[in-house]
């Protein structure tokens, strides 16, 4: 299996809701990432997990809470979001050590905050 | 700090014409450079990486450390090449961390 699978594909939530985005890969990758992509913009890094430990947090607001329960799963818990958080949220995975290892991206979850 | 610059937001060529998408980078160490492509309604996918020196779908890219460039080239563009192209740099970010930084992207349109 060479894919990164993200669920749900689409999510609409109110500003008081709590929801979670899920990401799964079975390529044995030990680095996993969350990116945010606004329309017609490049992906922006949010979080990096390496060997199930949070290694990079790009000063993301606490209303976004990542979790890596095991080496195959990555979650992003959402609470009290703002309309400007509406975007495509991309999960990616890679080999944890560098050496020109590319990131493999999922299809993303398109989030709309109302 | 690492930075990737793609100077052209939009690029339009005719089918069969050569195409070059420019990418310049700023990084103090030895960079890992990639080209990613995003076709309409599809996931972001890897096109090329500099260390492989391969040709994918007729595209090539050569790392020029002197000019800090990694331009993407194809001698004869096809309509199915129309997509958003992102140049990306994976650089050291402290500790044991590396992160992938994207340029702003170039939207390539190949006209019939």
Image (cartoon, helix red, strand yellow):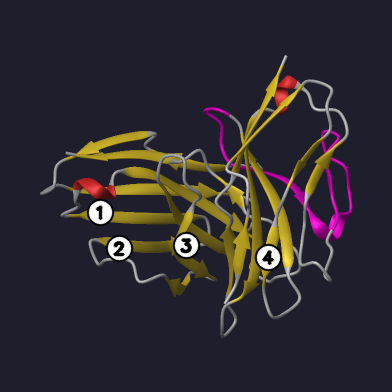
Q: Alpha-carbon neighbours of circle 2 within 10 Å: few (<14), some, or many (≥20)? A: some
Q: Nearer the viewer, residue A38 or A90?
A: A38
**Residue extent of the magenta highlight:** B40-62
Q: Secondary structure at mark 1?
A: strand
Rounded to the nearest angstrom, the CA distance separating label 4 from label 1 is 34 Å
Q: Disc 4 sits on a residue from what chain?
A: B
3 or 1: tag closer to the N-terminus: 3
Residue farthest toward the left in the current orientation of the protein: A16
Which-is-in-front pick, marks 2 and 3? Answer: 2
Q: Chain of mark 2?
A: A
Q: In the image, A70: left or right of A20?
A: right
Helix, strand, or loop for circle 2?
strand
Q: Is residue A60 left or right of residue B11?
A: left
Q: Which mark identifies residue A112? A: none
In magenta segment, residue A89: no
Identify the residue position indicated by label 4 in the image: B25
Task: Give the secondary structure at mark 3.
Answer: strand
Reading the chain from its start, which is encountered first: label 2 or label 3? 2
Does B47 lie within the magenta span? yes
Q: Nearer the viewer, mark 2 or mark 4?
A: 4
Depth order, front residue of B52/B107: B107
Give the quarter of the figure containing the C terminus of chain B: top right
């Amino acid at each position: 299996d060479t894919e990164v699978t993200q669920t749900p594909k689409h999510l609409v939530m109110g500003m008081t809701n709590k929801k979670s985005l899920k990401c799964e890969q079975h390529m044995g990758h030990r680095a996993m990432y969350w990116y945010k992509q606004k329309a017609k913009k490049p992906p922006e890094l949010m979080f990096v997990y390496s060997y199930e430990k949070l290694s990079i947090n790009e000063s993301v607001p606490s209303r976004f809470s990542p979790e890596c329960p095991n080496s195959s799963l990555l979650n992003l818990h959402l609470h009290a979001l703002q309309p400007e958080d509406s975007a495509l949220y991309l999960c990616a995975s890679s080999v944890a050590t560098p050496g020109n290892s590319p990131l493999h991206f999922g299809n993303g979850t398109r989030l709309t905050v109302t | 700090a690492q930075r990737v610059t793609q100077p052209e937001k939009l690029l339009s060529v005719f089918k069969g014409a050569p195409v070059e998408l420019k990418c310049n980078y700023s990084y103090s160490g030895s960079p890992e450079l990639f080209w990613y492509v995003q076709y309409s309604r599809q996931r972001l996918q890897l096109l090329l990486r500099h260390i492989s020196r391969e040709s994918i779908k007729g595209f090539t890219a050569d790392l020029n450390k002197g000019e800090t460039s990694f331009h993407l080239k194809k001698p004869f563009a096809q309509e199915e090449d129309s997509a958003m192209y992102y140049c990306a740099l994976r650089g050291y970010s402290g500790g044991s961390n590396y992160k992938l930084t994207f340029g702003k992207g170039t939207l390539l349109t190949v006209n019939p």
